[in-house]
Image: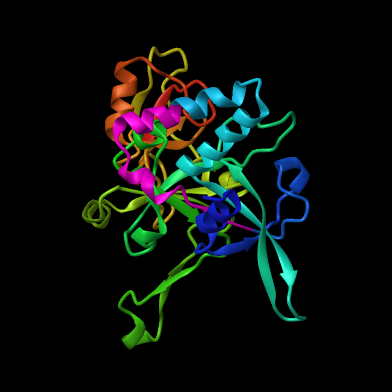
Amino acid sequence: MNVHRLYFRLGASRPKCAVTLDKRLFGIPADADLYLFAQNHESVGHMSEDVREAFELCIQELPGSDSEDLRALGTFLKVFFEGGFAYNKKEHASASSYIPRVVGIGALGVTPAFEGQGGIATGYPYHFDAKFFHYLDAVPVSIAAISAMSERHGRYGVCFTRCVFIWDGGALESEGKLDFCAPAPHGGFFYMPRDLSQYQALGGLLYAFGEARDNLEAAVSVAAEAPSADQAAPQSTQAVRQGPEGDHRVCVVCLSSDATMAAVPCGHRAYCPECASQLAAQHRANCPVCRAAVSSVMRIH
């Protein structure tokens, strides 16, 4: 298949959003106006384990090759297998209409592709119900390190900026009101189980992009008397204030249960009770958010 046709096929049906980042800093083509989610190829979900391992080996080894052609092949295989972001230029057909033309595609990664490249950080994972994101808007996670994180990391997709959900929560007929939420005002990734019935039962996880992380990582105000900082491991203490209404933050350790325990003294609410107890038993006393020493943990009601 022609490479340009594959690029278009990968991103053709996905919603588009305007590029608002510093293009030079993030390695985005200078003439790109829009970005969209480029799905990995549909065949990835049907590959045998041997074929998947072969792809993963090529993706790992080819970028370090002395051959420019092999390095390019490694990038192609990475997008084919993992997906990424496609960038479109607006070619105006008239004053009020345009045709999007693909000008580049970016692979996903956790290390910079060039010196000084910027990266997009995500904050805490938040739980959402299956009614928010359509199952078919996600593709299978092909990166083993991600799919192994939890049972809710089987499929993923992009939640674009200004994505708002509206539904009848029961007050439409009586009060003329609809419920709504904007789960990621700056955009983000969402994850869900690989199986549809499991998704309907468990829901998924949302990771917000960029500036939203500052809000997601806001510390709880800790005012209770805490044990001394020289304890061997954090101890559980009763919390002192009520958490935000409807705040379904997920434990950053198990990525399954609600995070109802905050670290003291930093105040980051990051644990469920079970994981907080396990960490205390293992004498692991550093906050997973800011890495500060933890003297105790407090339950948030």
Residue 300 horizontal/vertical position (percent): 37, 42
Q: Which residue is located at x 61 percent, y 44 percent?
A: 106
Q: Which residue is located at x 40 percent, y 35 percent?
A: 146
**Location of residue 36 with respect to 227 vertically, above or below:** below
Span highlighted in magenta in the image: 35-56
**Location of residue 121 with respect to 20 vertically, above or below:** above
Residue 33 horizontal/vertical position (percent): 71, 60
Name the residue nearer the viewer: 149 or 232.
Answer: 149
Any part of residue 217 in sight = no
Q: Quadrant of residue 91?
A: bottom right
Q: Is residue 198 left or right of residue 109?
A: left
Any part of residue 95 in sight = yes
Q: Is residue 162 magenta?
A: no
Q: Which residue is located at x 54 percent, y 29 percent?
A: 290
Q: Quadrant of residue 93?
A: bottom right
**How many numbered circles are shown?**
0
